[in-house]
Image (cartoon, helix red, strand yellow):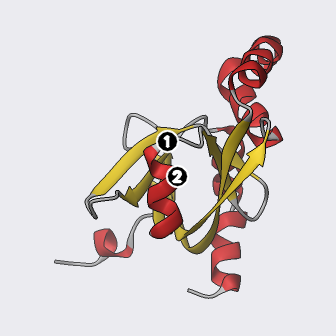
Amino acid sequence: MDAREIAAELQHPGARTLLASATLLRLAYNGPDGAPRVVPMGFFWDGSRIVVCTAVTAPKVGAMSSRPDVAVTIDVGDTPAEARSVLLRGRARVDVVDGVPDEFVTASAKALGAHRVPELERRARLTYRRMARISIEPAWARFYDFGAGRLPSFLTEPT
């Protein structure tokens, strides 16, 4: 998939809404033993990359540092008419940074609401001298909106 195709998928209004408003993604990576792992995480979309932040001691930090290929799903909707998802594949870049990254605070605000962010930020700054900032640049992306008929092609092909 080339950059133009990726951008077209992620610039779809439904994809942009989901990237801006969803509070969790599911991040798939290969663990230290090579077995797959999936973890839910808060995230920030900066317009070109997914950013997640975690403790530097989290097992995923070491795993993604040595095996950076990852997959992400961001999905909402409990019925077929409401189901929407953004699927991404890419490579994770792990940077250990001093303090608490702004993306961590911004991602937390989506889930907690603005009124609870100052206390979360205060506690995070007391807890973390350093954090791992993991950025994922999409190498492949799809946006599906099942209610609007934007489906994976295999579901629309006759059997």
- In the picture of the structure, the residue carrying the numbered disc 1 is 58
Q: Residue 46: give its label.
A: none
In contact (CB < 8 Å): disc 2 and disc 1: yes
Question: Measured along the vertical axis of the image, is residue 130 above or below residue 111?
Answer: below
Type of residue at label 1? Ala
Give coordinates of residue 28: x percent, y percent.
Answer: 41, 56
Residue shown at 62%/88% (left/top)? 2
Q: Is residue 154 above or below residue 118?
A: below
Mark 2 element type:
helix
Q: Residue farthest to the left?
A: 159
Q: Nearer the viewer, residue 119 or 146?
A: 119
- Residue 61's mark? 2
For this rendering, which residue is in front, 145 or 106? Answer: 106
Q: Looking at this view, is 37 or 155 the one in front?
A: 37
- Report x, y in % for residue 24: 55, 38
**Quadrant of the rendered image containing residue 113:** top right
Q: Residue at position x 25%, y 59% from top?
A: 35
Instruction: Mark yes or no: residue 58 visible.
Output: yes
Q: Tell me the distance, in whole angstroms, between the alpha carbons under discs 2 and 1.
A: 6 Å
